[in-house]
Image: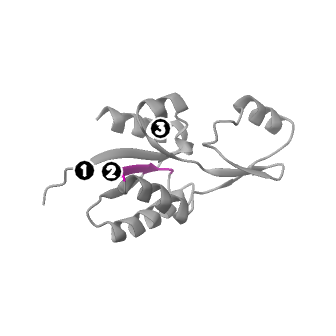
Amino acid sequence: MENNREFIISTDTNSDLPFSFIDENNINLMGLGYTMDGVTRFSDDRTIDPHDFYERMRAGSMPTTMQINPEQAEKSFEALVTQGFDVLHIAFSSGLSGSYNSAEMGAAEVRERYPEANVVVIDSLSASLGQGLMVYYAVQL
C-alpha cells in the first residue's frame, strides 16, 4: 500500500528555535509549561517577553517546569493527522524530561485510531539548540 500523505515536522519549545524559523518551515510546536510567581504559562506563548522572563529570574523568581503531557501530544498529533499529515516529532531528551515518553504515548493513541497515518516520535537525546539542530537538519532534508 502506497502512502501519499505529506508529512510535517514537529518539536517542542525546548528546541530553542526562533518563532520565525518555526513559522517559515510550518513546524508544529508543542509548548512546555512552567510556573513562575504562581502563574502557569506555556513557552509557545508569543506574548512572553524573554527579557522580562530573565529579569524576573535575576531578581530571584525561579520557574518550575512541566513536561508535555500525553493528552497534549495526542491532541496536537491528531489535529495534524486529521488534516492529512504524517508526523515526525523530534522530542526533548528522555534523559532530561518525560516529554519524549508523553509524546510517544500520545502518538500511540493516534496511531491506534488512525492506522493509515505515520506518527513517529524521535528521542533527540539532546536539549536546547542540540535538539533544534536536529529539527533544522530534518527541515533541510
Q: What element carries label 1?
A: loop
CB under 8 Å between discs 1 and 2: yes
Task: Give percent across and percent down for residue 116.
Answer: 25, 63
- The residue segment tinted magenta is 83-92
**How many marks are shown on the rendered structure?**
3
Q: Depth check: 16 or 6 in front?
A: 6
Query: Real-space Cα distance between discs 3 and 2?
Result: 21 Å
**Which residue lies at the image location 29% right of the left edge and 59% below the top edge?**
117
The crowding category of the residue bearing disc 1, from other C-alpha atoms within 10 Å (few below 14, some 14 to 19, many at least 20), is some
Q: Depth-wise, is mark 3 or mark 2 nearer the camera? A: 2
The crowding category of the residue bearing disc 3, from other C-alpha atoms within 10 Å (few below 14, some 14 to 19, many at least 20), is many
The residue indicated by pointer 2 is: 85
The residue indicated by pointer 3 is: 132
Q: Depth check: 101 or 76 in front?
A: 76
The residue indicated by pointer 1 is: 5
Q: What element carries label 2?
A: strand
